[in-house]
Amino acid sequence: MGCRKDVRAVRGQGCRRRRELIFVFIMTMILVLCHVSAFSSSSSSSSSAWQQQGRASKRESMQCWGAASASAANKCVELEHAEYEAMGVPKGNGRELEPVIILHGLLGSKRNFASLGSGLAKQLQKKRKIVALDLRNHGDNNHDWREEMSYSDMASDVLAFMDSQNFNKAVLVGHSMGGKVAKSLALMHPERVAGLVVLDIAPVRYTTEQDESWNAVATIIHAISQVDLSKPGKTRKDVDADLRKTVPDPALRAFVLTNLEQIRGGGDDDDDDAQEQQQPSLRWKININAIIQQLDTIAGFDVNYNDVTTNVDNDDDDADDKNIPQYQGDTFIIHGGA
């Protein structure tokens, strides 16, 4: 989660500087990776065949073939997205460079990477689409909340989005939970991933007992679930006050509050106005109930491979490497600040 939460104000400038340096480093790594993938991309006949198949996989029939659960296999979540595209991207010739897909972390959204997306779109020497997604139960996907949040399910959502956009391959950039989603997709369908950039996450199980950062995340999640938004007229300031005891860092609280949205009513007369005043004024844009129920799943790392869900975070020295999915493409792993 960036700089330590207990740093004093006098060190705030140093933290901001570190974040700026991390941003520059991430930009550099993605630029390099995209440069590499440009050389490796080709428009073969198999690609053309895939494009024909992809056109049949539009949003109205987004099947989750790799979904971990039967209930999730019927249809993927139609992920909301933001697209950043600079002038000069070739169109209509079937030879576009692989897009970059950015995947946010737990409690995040596509908006977290607006600066990164805009910057990449402008700075890449060989222009390509930059897309930031809202993962399931986050951001603007509250039209389709789900109970399941396995990494196989979330990776299948991303794959279905790629199909809907006719993306043969993509460079995946994932932060935290989004990094695990990116890794899952790379292991499930390595042929669809042109490169990986993973930030702040390892393909292992995190526990509250052994990992201080994950314990802090779990504490924040449970604090959010205890906030009562049913009181009419409740404001962001009120929610901030509710969270202050459990989440003393104002920067973290501000991040959490980005998941609040105002409920807008549509009354035209006094009766409607009076009724609106008795209704909750705020709601979460995240499916907090599902996130809490799936917190143990999110802490782990499952991969649905050949219709078998594997917990890759098992430390089994006797495991047969041939039975473990592998991704051998270009990969950058970036360790975040302490």
Image (cartoon, rainbow, N blue to C red):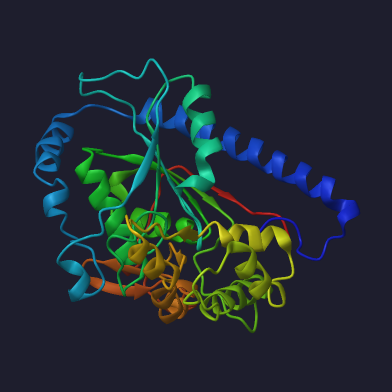
Work out whether residue 269 or residue 333 is closer to the camera in this orientation and state it. 269
Q: Is residue 10 left or right of residue 110?
A: right
Q: Where is residue 291 in the image (x, y as percent from the top left)?
A: 43, 74
**Camera-side residue of 240 and 171:** 240
- Seen as rendered, the residue at the extreme top is 88
Looking at the rendered image, the quarter that the N terminus falls into is: bottom right
Q: Quadrant of the C terminus?
A: bottom right
Q: Which residue lies furthest to the front in this view?
A: 270
In the rendered structure, the answer to whether residue 205 lies left or right of residue 246 reads: left
The answer to whether residue 322 is visible is no
Q: Position of residue 88 (x, y in %)?
A: 38, 15
Residue 298: x %, y % from top left? 45, 72
| Residue at 35% across, 19% down | 89
In the rendered view, would you say 320 is above or below 172? below
State the count of labels.
0
Is residue 175 depicted above or below 217 in this figure?
above
Q: Which residue is drawn at 28% across and 60% down?
A: 143
Q: Residue furthest bottom?
A: 209
Left or right, residue 250 beside residue 224: right
Q: Position of residue 70 (x, y in %)?
A: 18, 75
Residue closest to the eye, 314 or 265:
265
The image quadrant that residue 217 belongs to is bottom right
As drawn, the residue found furthest toward the right would be: 10
Is 94 situated left or right of 200 in this image?
left
Residue 291 visible here? yes
> Camera-side residue: 288 or 230?
230
Please report the residue visible at 23 percent of the width from the left and 39 percent of the height from the top. Answer: 165
Q: In this view, does 163 lie above or below 336?
A: above
Residue at image position (71%, 55%) is: 337
